[in-house]
Image: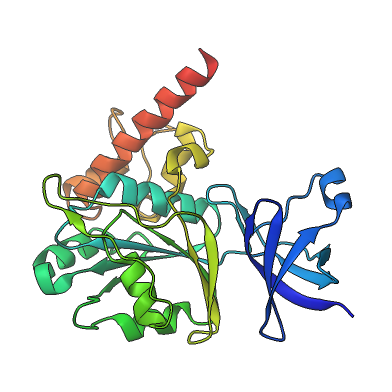
Amino acid sequence: MSKKGIILKGIGGFYYVKADDGITYETKARGRFRKEGIKPLAGDVVDIADGWIENIYERKNVLIRPPVANAELLLIVISASLPVPDMVMIDKLILYGKKSGLEVILAINKIDEGRKAAEEIAAQYENADVRTVLMSNHTGEGIEELKSLIRGKCTCLAGQSAVGKSSFVNALSPSLRLETGDIIKKTEKGKQTTRQSELIYLDEIEGSIVDTPGFAVLEALDIEPEELQYLYPEFKNVGNCRFKGCIHDKEADCAVKMAVKDGRINKRRYARYLVIFEELKQRRLEKYD
């Protein structure tokens, strides 16, 4: 008799499926999936029987990096203190989430060490259609709010090392006891503690967390440089630029640049837009060189 379940991870041709009966089964995929060009992914909803994956249900979406099916939410965790946030990387993650059709939440951790810095970061995203949550794994502030936001969903967890991702998952489900990274004092950067992509089902939130070694965000962001502006909601309602096809860089009479000047668009967000735009242009040149 077949059972329905969800793939938690795949290792060496084996797929570990948490079935509706609460048991996790070690399975292999039928050869026909390979012939059809279908590779089972963490997050896939499947039917299993006698140790074999017999059916893969239609996917809502597929992320390339990390390879995950049916993700619903991207939770980006950053630090209000150390390690210092890489805001360009954060914006790339947000762009990737939006391009992939995911809800995006930015959780700013360690507010007990830098509340003012956290509030300044949150202010940069007021008009960016990104929900921000101030939190502290140490004091517990913001944890319940995040629990309610991710309940019942498949959530991809992303961010720099040592910002508190594993500690946050441990707060959701203390029995997991995920390894946590320490700050390397000499470099003020974190050690990477997550070894492989894995979907972790948490009964406490009736949902799952995709704990991943990282997103190759710029490579995964498969867009032309000129399309980048359409992933910035704050650019949309500031009026019309003088020139059709304005990319909001060096053009005269640019409505976006005027909005930056008068404070309607955050100047730091805009500066990072230009950085990412140039990176996308360079990648295109290298691709066709």
Q: Is 185 left or right of 23, judged from the image as shown?
A: left
Is residue 113 shown above or below 173? above
Residue 157 at x, y = what percent? 43, 63
Tell me which residue sits at (87%, 50%) in the image.
31
Horizontally, residue 192 falls left or right of residue 42, namely: left
The x and y percentages for residue 223 are 52, 37
Quadrant in the picture for residue 81:
bottom left
In terms of depth relative to the viewer, which is nearer, 27 or 86? 27
Image coloring type:
rainbow
Q: Compared with residue 257, is residue 102 higher up or lower down, i.e. above or below?
A: below
Q: Nearer the viewer, residue 148 or 81?
A: 81
Which residue is rendered at x = 17% and y = 66% of the image?
118
**Left-right relation of 87 to 93:** left
Q: Quadrant of residue 119?
A: bottom left
**Residue at left 48%, top 55%?**
98
The N terminus, quarter of image? bottom right
In the image: residue 112, left or right of residue 286:
left
Image coords of residue 38 (percent x, y): 78, 49
Residue 183 in view here: yes
Residue drawn at (86%, 77%) of the image: 2
Above or below for 262 versus 200: above
Q: Is residue 248 visible?
A: no
Picture quadrant where residue 138 is located: bottom left
Percent from the top left, x then y, of residue 180? Answer: 31, 65
